[in-house]
Image (cartoon, rainbow, N blue to C red):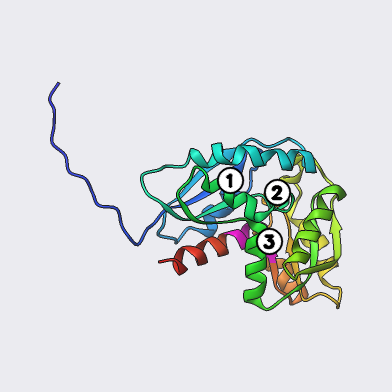
Amino acid sequence: MTSLPYTLDPDDPAAVPMGLVVLQTDETIEPEFRTLFARDKSPLYVTRIPSGAEVNTGTLARMEVDLPAAANLLPKARPYRVVGYGCTSASSVIGSDRVEQMIRQTCNAQTVTNPLRAAAACAADRGVSKFALLSPYIEEVNTPLRRAFAKQGISMDVFGTFGEAEEAKVVRISTASVVDAAVRLGADPTVDAVFLSCTNLRTLAAIPQIEAQIGKPVLSSNQSLAWHMKHLNVSQI
């Protein structure tokens, strides 16, 4: 064997990595993030967290104890300006502050966000606060979600759900179904925007179709999380 010399490239200070904690059952957030971050210079590193095949408050709450182990699997060579936790409903059950605390136990992250925290920031940026909520969840999950948004000053008095607990079915709900349901809810004159909840619900292609039909802003879990992560990554330079 011949030992060969080598040099090390310096890290690009303008391309600080971002981290993302993805649910084991999620099939949507990574494909949508590939589109949303296609032109972003910062690398995005992903780790997975165990999650239940069905979404209920019990399976969501259990993720709290697994957050440090999941975050610990992100590369450690450099610190992170921002790490995202990809679950809207679990963030409402566990609490955004607790999510951040658990991730930062094992990951050198300057800040942590999630779709709930991100959607509130995005809503403020858009100047909207009266949402129609479209959810795939069962009612025991919808209740804490709406309550958590209300604490952020966002009302969701108009809401509808597909009532599906099984993650493998949530990800396969058709774009046409999402568009039809969101247009129906968003047409209500008392709302000024629509929120499509769940990182596993395919919404990216649906958003422009819904906005074209109702003439109101449409936010989603993945779109809001990506927007907030980019915003935080730039603002902390």
Query: Marks 1 and 3, how far apart in space?
Result: 24 Å
- The label nearer to you, 1 versus 3, is 1
Pointer 2 local density, CA inside 10 Å: few below 14, some 14–19, many at least 20? some
Of the residues under marks 1 and 2, which one precedes in the sequence? 2
Q: Extreme top residue here?
A: 1
Dominant secondary structure (helix, strand or loop) of the stretch shown in magenta: helix
Where does the image place residue 136, in percent across and percent down from the top left? Answer: 79, 51
Check contact, mark 1 vs mark 3: CB within 8 A: no
x then y, percent, for residue 143: 84, 54
Q: Which residue is mark 1?
A: 102
191 with respect to 14 (left or right): right
At horizontal 65% and vertical 57% (from top left) the residue drawn is 115
Q: Residue at x 66, y 49 (%)?
A: 87
SS category of the residue bearing label 2:
helix
Residue 56 visible in the snapshot: no
Q: Circle 2 sits on which residue?
A: 94
| Amino acid under disc 2 | Ile
What kind of residue is marked 1?
A: Met
* Nearest to the observer: residue 129 or residue 193: 129
Q: Which mark is residue 220?
A: 3
Quadrant in the rendering for residue 2? top left
Residue 39 in view of the camera? yes
Q: CA distance from mark 2 to mark 3?
A: 20 Å
> Which amino acid type corresponds to the residue marked 3 in the rendered image?
Ser
- 223 lies above or below 83: below
